[in-house]
Every structure is written in structure tokens, then in C-alpha cells.
């Protein structure tokens, strides 16, 4: 990953390593992202969501293909497809399974609908076996798909 595509991964890794940063990020995503990335501004407001052992977040744009380009780069083709947009909102568990993400039946899936003014970024669950990894080791395992919520991270 390089450039814009790495911005999101850097944010996620900082959240994993710095609890105070994560707290600020979850409270005021837009402001925290602007400060962290040293940007003058961002094009949209950002809400940052955290996947937990009880809640899995999935991002979709049901109207078109609103996507956090400033953090993740160019959206994948499937994200813009009508099929993904409809199915992610109607049957998220099924679409997650197609990406290889099989969640426990008791895990709640929250679907978040991006808009022209509001974008979402998911902080994926950090793999347990990475607790002693450095920032440089963590950044490459954070994928675009994990920050949209269609997959978990494995390491």
C-alpha cells in the first residue's frame, strides 16, 4: 500500500496502538483524521466505527457509490455494483460470507449507509497474535476490505 491507500491503514494502526487516539477518533472522526493526517480539510465528514467481539460493522452506499477515497483510494468495482449495494443492506450476513467472513450467529451486524456528505471507516478487530507487532508490521495487514467491513484481518 502506498499514498492515499495507506492513510486508512495508518489511522487503524494508530487506533490499535493508542487508546486515547482511538477514543478521540470514535468521538469525532473528522477532526481527529484531519489532525492525524495533517490535512487542511477533508471533503466529507467521517464517522469511525469499531468492530468488536459483539458487533461487526459493514459500510455500503445504497444510492450510488459514496466511498472514503481520501483514506482508501479508488473504490473496488464490486463496491459500486448494484448487487453489492442492495444485498449488503438487505442480507449483510450472506454478502459477508461471500467475502469469506463467517460471523457467529449471535454477532450483531450493523450496516452503515454512506452519503454524499458522510463517509465511514471501520476499525477492524486486531488479530490476537499481533499484540507484540510493531507499527511497521501491522500496517500491511490492514486491508481496504477490512476498513469497509467485508472481511476480518488474519495474521
Image: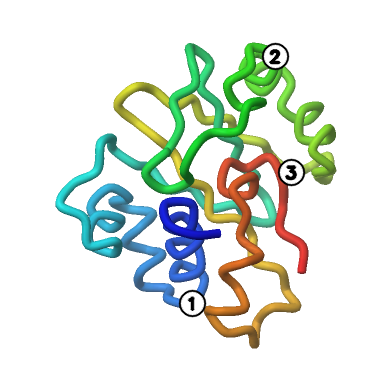
Between label 3 and label 1, give the one nearer the viewer: 1
Instruction: Please tell me which residue is depicted at 61% across the width and 27% down the height of the picture.
Output: 79
SS for callout 2: helix
Task: First in sequence, mark 3 or 2: give its number.
Answer: 2
Q: Is residue 23 above or below residue 66?
A: below
CA gap, disc 3 and disc 1? 25 Å
Left/right of residue 113 with respect to residue 93 in the rendered view: left
Question: Is label 3 or label 2 in front?
Answer: 2
Q: In terms of secondary structure, where does tag 3 sit? A: loop
Up-down: is 63 above or below 126? above
- Mark found first going from the N terminus, 3 or 1: 1
| Image x and y of residue 37, in percent | 29, 61
Residue drawn at point x = 44 percent, y = 39 percent: 120
Disc 3 target residue: 107
Which image quarter holds the C terminus? bottom right
Name the residue beneath numbered marker 2. Answer: 83
Labels 3 and 1 touching (C-beta < 8 A): no
Residue 17 image label: 1
Report, in whole angstroms, how far the alpha carbon at label 3 lies from the one at label 2. Answer: 24 Å
Q: Position of residue 49 (x, y in %)?
A: 48, 47
Badge 3 vs badge 2, beta-carbon distance below 8 Å: no
Mark 1 Cα-neighbour bin, 10 Å: few <14, some 14–19, many ≥20: some
Q: Whole-Å distance between the Cαs marked 1 and 2?
A: 36 Å
Image spot of residue 33 (x, y percent): 30, 55
N-terminal-most mark, 1 or 2: 1
Q: Is residue 88 left or right of residue 12?
A: right
Q: Quadrant of residue 36?
A: bottom left
Check the image and name the residue furthest to the bottom: 132
Amino acid at each position: 500500500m502506498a499514498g492515499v491507500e495507506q492513510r486508512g491503514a495508518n489511522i487503524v494502526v494508530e487506533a490499535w496502538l493508542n487508546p486515547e487516539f482511538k477514543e478521540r477518533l470514535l468521538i469525532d472522526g473528522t477532526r481527529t483524521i484531519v489532525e492525524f493526517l495533517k490535512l487542511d480539510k477533508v471533503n466529507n465528514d467521517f464517522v469511525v466505527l469499531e468492530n468488536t467481539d459483539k458487533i461487526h460493522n459493514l459500510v455500503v452506499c445504497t444510492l450510488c457509490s459514496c466511498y472514503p477515497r481520501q483514506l482508501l483510494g479508488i473504490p473496488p468495482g464490486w463496491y459500486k455494483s448494484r448487487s453489492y449495494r442492495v444485498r449488503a443492506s438487505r442480507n449483510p450476513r450472506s454478502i459477508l460470507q461471500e467475502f469469506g467472513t463467517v460471523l457467529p450467529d449471535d454477532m450483531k451486524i450493523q450496516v452503515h449507509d454512506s452519503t454524499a456528505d458522510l463517509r465511514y471507516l471501520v476499525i477492524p478487530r486486531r488479530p490476537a497474535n499481533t499484540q507484540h507487532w510493531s507499527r511497521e508490521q501491522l500496517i500491511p495487514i490492514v486491508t481496504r476490505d477490512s476498513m469497509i467491513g467485508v472481511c476480518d484481518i488474519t495474521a
